[in-house]
Image (cartoon, rainbow, N blue to C red):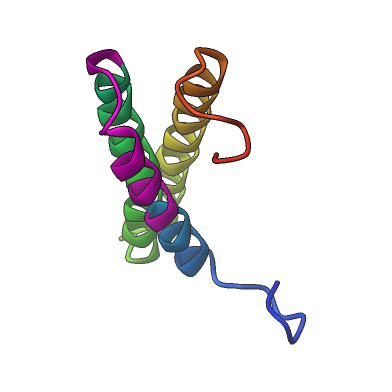
Amino acid sequence: MNSSSQPVDICERTFAFAVRIVKLCRYLERQSWVDRQLVIQLLKAGTSIGANVEEAQAGQSRADFTSKNSIALKEARETIYWLRLLMESDSVSRKRV
């Protein structure tokens, strides 16, 4: 929600999330070789959420819309996995995430 209590568009929210993922990945790319490999996975999954939500907006059918949003959900779950792995392996602090 924004300051006027209106819901924020899902496309805007997922774009803002992708920006945060990019910034976190820029920070993490300075880390070890192993961390950089995990960052590649995080960057792909974390930024594809918004891309799939955007694609869904132009779905050719209800089924296409649903499919694209389902892919976005899968990418979101994968992103959570990579973030958890980075935190639990002490590659990044929970606070930074």
- Residue drawn at point x = 26 percent, y = 33 percent: 29
Percent from the top left, x then y, of residue 75? 42, 35
- Residue drawn at point x = 31 percent, y = 58 percent: 55
Percent from the top left, x then y, of residue 14? 46, 57
* Viewer-nearest residue: 84 or 87: 87
Q: Is residue 32 above or below residue 51?
A: above
* Viewer-nearest residue: 2 or 30: 30
* Viewer-nearest residue: 40 or 96: 96
* Viewer-nearest residue: 95 or 16: 95
Residue 5 left/right relative to 15:
right
- Residue drawn at point x = 56 percent, y = 15 percent: 88
- Residue drawn at point x = 30 percent, y = 26 percent: 31
Residue 44 left/right relative to 87:
left
Q: Is residue 61 above or below residue 2?
A: above
Of all residues, the one furthest to the right in this rendering is: 5
Q: Which residues are magenta?
A: 19-34
In the rendered image, the quadrant that contains the C terminus is top right
Q: Quadrant of residue 72?
A: top left
* Residue 21 within the magenta-colored segment of the rendering: yes
Task: Assign the magenta stretch its main secondary structure.
Answer: helix
In the rendered image, the quadrant that contains the N terminus is bottom right
Of all residues, the one furthest to the bottom in this rendering is: 4
* Residue 59 within the magenta-colored segment of the rendering: no
Percent from the top left, x then y, of residue 47? 34, 47
Residue 33 left/right relative to 21:
left
Q: How many numbered marks, from 0 up? A: 0
